[in-house]
Image: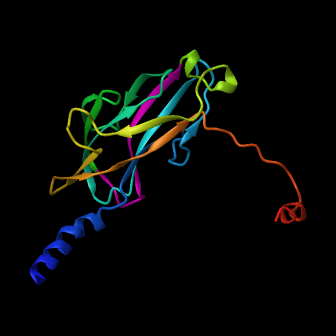
Amino acid sequence: MRSIAIAALLLLVPAVLFGGQTIGAYFTYTPNQMYYSPQPFEPMTAYIYGHALNCFTSGIEFAVQLPPGIVMTGWSVPEGSLTLGDPIGGLAATYFPPLNGFEPGYNLLATVQLMTLPEGACCWFGGTLIDAPLRIVADPRSGAAMPRQSCYPEMYLVDVVGLTSAICPCQIATEETSWGAIKSLY
């Protein structure tokens, strides 16, 4: 019985050590803005970053799901990379030298240039989109359930959580009021 408990703990150690790895699309060069409100025919750039990858990343595989009315016009990966596929149909990329997933805690994995068609603009600019998701998902050709990374030098695969960004996020109006008026609500 004790050996079963020890085996279960040993199997959980990698999950604890490598938990929290994410990959997401950001609309600023520094990974901090996951929403964007485009006008018709506006070009925009989505920077695909990996966060807390917790190893030296030698490869990654993922796909980008775009909302209707948003099209990809180009893409790139860092120098020294080899790729198979594209971000929309599924991208597998290798990196040399491997990317340091420890410092500074995030890595630029790919850059995707996008453009909005008239129906892909926000509803307040005459389009049809509101709260449209731009998702990072598993490469459909890999058969995996989640995006994955390859860690160097052991070359093992780790699942990475794909994040969802918002195009045309729903805007909530705020009102200026005094603290006394807010307290009077309760």
Q: Is residue 128 visible?
A: yes
Q: Residue at x 10, y 82 (%)?
A: 1
Number of numbered discs:
0
Residue toward you, 156 or 128: 128
Q: Residue furthest front?
A: 186
Q: Is residue 26 visible?
A: no
Residue toward you, 49 or 63: 63
**Considering only vertical position in the picture, is 11 above or below 126?**
below
Q: Quadrant of residue 182?
A: bottom right
Q: Is residue 71 left or right of residue 100?
A: right
Q: Is residue 51 left or right of residue 154?
A: right
Residue 48 drawn at (x, y percent)? 41, 40
The chosen color scheme is rainbow
Q: Residue at x 43, y 23 (%)?
A: 72
Q: Residue at x 35, y 55 (%)?
A: 21
Residue toward you, 143 or 97: 143
> Is residue 111 magenta-colored?
yes
Question: Where does the C terminus fall, quadrant-wise?
Answer: bottom right
Q: Is residue 48 left or right of residue 9?
A: right
**Considering only vertical position in the picture, is 42 above or below 14?**
above
Over which residues does the magenta segment extend?
99-116
Q: Is residue 126 left or right of residue 104?
A: right
Residue 45 drawn at (x, y percent)? 50, 31
Q: Residue at x 29, y 31 (%)?
A: 90
Kindly report the secondary structure that dominates the magenta region of the rendered protein.
strand
**Considering only vertical position in the picture, is 101 above or below 167?**
below
Q: Residue furthest bottom?
A: 2
Residue 64 drawn at (x, y percent)? 38, 33
Residue 98 drawn at (x, y percent)? 26, 50
